[in-house]
């Protein structure tokens, strides 16, 4: 399954060691379901640069096209520091993707309707791995 909107991510020219793709993008890269957008977690230095250039949404994120960038907007649902999630991310085709275990924990804390479906997909995938 092809991950959508990676061209938009690459066009941002962010330093590759300073961010990782998150959320449904991680499911898409593993072939679990299609992503409708791209969520990115960034380290503090990059976040401080981006907020000078782009307005924040009501949720405290930055949206650029189909890309949603966050530094703290996933809290309190995160179960690990953002830097750890970025530093330990899987590298697939040259891009960093937050490990599915972190995405699973985040979705279990949020528990929206779509999260429940994703939780099943991730758990089944991790069991078969």
Image (cartoon, helix red, strand yellow):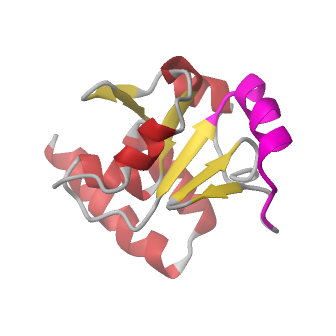
Vertical side of 81 occupied by 26: above or below: below
View extreme (bottom): residue = 113
Give the residues in magenta: 42-57
Residue at x-position 73% and y-position 55% = 61
Where, by quadrant of the figure, is residue 71 drawn?
top right
Residue 25 position, x and y percent, is 38, 52
* Tally of numbered discs: 0
Q: On the rendered structure, is 47 left or right of 17?
A: right
What is the magenta segment's predominant secondary structure? helix
Question: Is 49 in the magenta?
Answer: yes
Residue 78 position, x and y percent, is 65, 46
Residue at x-position 43% and y-position 37% = 10
Residue at x-position 76% and y-position 52% = 76
Residue at x-position 75% and y-position 38% = 50
Q: Quadrant of the C terminus?
A: top left
Residue 14 position, x and y percent, is 56, 28
Q: Quadrant of the N terminus?
A: bottom left
Q: On the rendered structure, is 64 left or right of 129?
A: right
Where, by quadrant of the figure, is residue 72 drawn?
top right
Residue 127 position, x and y percent, is 21, 47
Q: On the rendered structure, is 63 left or right of 7?
A: right
Question: Is 72 in the magenta?
Answer: no
């Amino acid at each position: 399954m092809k991950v959508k909107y990676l061209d938009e991510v690459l066009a941002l020219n962010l330093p590759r060691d300073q961010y990782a793709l998150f959320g449904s993008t991680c499911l898409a890269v593993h072939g679990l379901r299609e992503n409708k957008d791209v969520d990115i977690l960034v380290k503090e230095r990059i976040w401080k640069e981006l907020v000078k250039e782009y307005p924040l949404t009501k949720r405290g994120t930055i949206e650029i096209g189909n890309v949603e960038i966050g530094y703290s907007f996933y809290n309190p649902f995160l179960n690990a520091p953002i830097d750890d999630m970025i530093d330990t991310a899987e590298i697939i085709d040259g891009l960093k993707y937050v490990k599915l275990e972190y995405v699973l924990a985040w979705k279990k804390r949020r528990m929206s309707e779509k999260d429940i479906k994703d939780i099943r997909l991730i758990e089944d995938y991790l069991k078969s791995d």
